[in-house]
Amino acid sequence: MPIADDFAATRLKPLAPGILLAFLGFALGFGLGAVFGANEDAIKGKLKADADAVLATAYEGDAAKAKAVVDKSWVYMQRAHLHAGVLGACALSLILLLALLEPPGWPARLAALAMGFGALAYGAYWMLAGFKAPGLGSTGAAKESLEWVAVPGSGAVILGFLATVALTVKALYFKRAA
């Protein structure tokens, strides 16, 4: 078997779920950038229309408050684009580092899965919060309603990163002599 095939089979395949999720996070970031470039005005229009639909109730007729929430929602959309792209790229690079260290055991598999999941979930959290806030009348309410996405997503990225650091230190400094 050629070296590349052996590497893919023994090192990358066990980490495949994390790699796929990291790619999806990365794709979300790229996809949002493309959608924003082609449809920025339409997206901003939808956010404004959602706020206008509840102007009398959620905003008590205060157009300035609605505008502030719509503007902040657009910032959340940009945040989704950046977080998904950067976390997806970081997750993918760290997963590849895990593949280079040694044949992946269950700690590396869990770290890869956590980082990939977190990259996708945390980027999606900001996008969902951006879309939800104008209809709720508050960015705070939107974020609070989506904590179930944000907390596991951000926690997974952090835990996956810390596990990768620990596994890297172990492989580089504490590897047993053969």
Image (cartoon, rainbow, N blue to C red):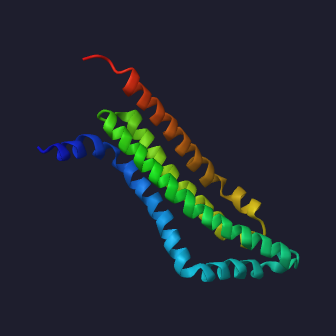
Q: Decide if residue 165 is on the left or right side of residue 146.
A: left
The residue closer to the viewer here, 58 or 75, is 75
Q: Decide if residue 48 is on the left or right side of residue 103.
A: right
Residue 14 shows in this picture? yes
In percent of width and height, residue 146 lies at: 65, 57
The residue closer to the viewer here, 4 or 120, is 4
Residue 116 shows in this picture? no
Vertical placement of 71 versus 156: above or below? below
- Quarter of the rendering occupied by the N terminus: top left
Please report the residue visible at 62 percent of the width from the left and 48 percent of the height from the top.
151
Vertical placement of 32 versus 45: above or below? above
Please report the residue visible at 19 percent of the width from the left and 46 percent of the height from the top.
4
Vertical placement of 34 versus 83: above or below? below
Q: Decide if residue 168 is on the left or right side of residue 1.
A: right
Please report the residue visible at 37 percent of the width from the left and 40 percent of the height from the top.
97
Please report the residue visible at 61 percent of the width from the left and 83 percent of the height from the top.
42
Q: Count the labels in the image.
A: 0
The residue closer to the viewer here, 145 or 127, is 127
In percent of width and height, residue 32 lies at: 52, 69
Residue found at the far top of this picture: 177
- Quarter of the rendering occupied by the C terminus: top left
In percent of width and height, residue 85 lies at: 50, 59
Quadrant in which residue 43 is drawn: bottom right
Quadrant in which residue 70 is drawn: bottom right
